[in-house]
Image (tube, rainbow, N blue to C red):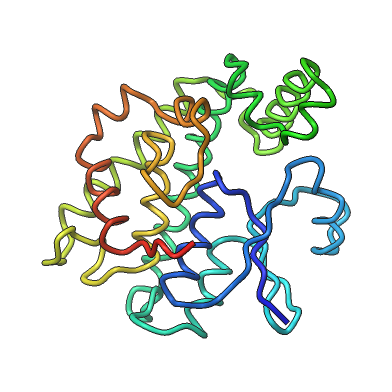
Amino acid sequence: MTTELLGIPYSPWSEKARWALEARKVPYAPVLYQPLLGEPALRWKLRKFTGRVSVPVLTDDEGRVHADSAVIARWADARGEGPALFPAEHAAEIDRFVALSERGLGAGRGLALRRALADDAALAELVPRGVSKVLGPVAIKIAAAGIRRTLRKYGTAGAQRDALEHTLAEVLDELRAALARSPSTATPKTIFATFTFADIAMAQVLAFVRPPAFGLKVKPANRARFEDPAFAEKYADLVAWRDAIYDAHRPRAK
């Protein structure tokens, strides 16, 4: 049985899982998840018929299902090859950075989705081409409804923009401080002495400041909505760090 990763090409959460699998040289088949349309099948796969469900979700070669990017990364770390992404001596701190990444990504997603709501081109990109051809202008309204649903799903529909920006800035400031005190002598520096999943997780937060050049497959209009020019200027050093981490540690096989 082939290991399959159900994910979204433009999602930083799916990118965390892809990067971990590829860094550990674990073969897998990517499977595209379509938000809304794919949810009934996802609920069946997870045997979760109420509450929130999301991707990435990995089905391993023994048919077991693993949900959440960090869970998938730990699974890959246990069976892959090369330097460990979760070295035991940093277990608690890596967990802290995973949680920090989730905070930053949640805030960044809330900001990016609000920007996309005001951009018909970005909304059109979110609808599968075949569906868009059939529905025409209605497809944009469906995409907008999907974004509003996502904002409600993750609890950011009523959040103030200033609050989301404050959270994102706090997370990026913590990353900057962590790199400043890191014992790493490598170029680029890593959060710990060696490259770990903490670097993968924190690098993804920068996707909502400026998307990376590869790894995330973001279409042009949404790439512009992911980007926040003011944050990109304020955190130019971290954007440069993320780009260097990608160049040094992100396999380009898939």
Q: Residue at x 39, y 73 (%)?
A: 85
Lateral position of residue 145 relative to residue 56, left or right:
right
Q: Residue at x 42, y 84 (%)?
A: 81
The picture places residue 164, in percent across and down from the top left corner, at 47, 28
Q: Reply above or below: 33 against 60.
A: above
Q: Residue furthest left?
A: 185
Lateral position of residue 139 relative to residue 61, left or right:
right
The picture places residue 66, in percent across and down from the top left corner, at 67, 70
Q: Quadrant of residue 92?
A: bottom left
How many marks the image carries: the answer is 0
Lateral position of residue 190 relative to residue 251, left or right:
left
Q: Reply above or below: 185 against 175.
A: below
The picture places residue 195, in percent across and down from the top left corner, at 29, 68
Q: Quadrant of residue 234?
A: top left
State the residue in front, 28 or 225. 28
Q: Residue at x 40, y 75 (%)?
A: 86
The picture places residue 162, in percent across and down from the top left corner, at 44, 20
State the residue in front, 165 or 36. 36
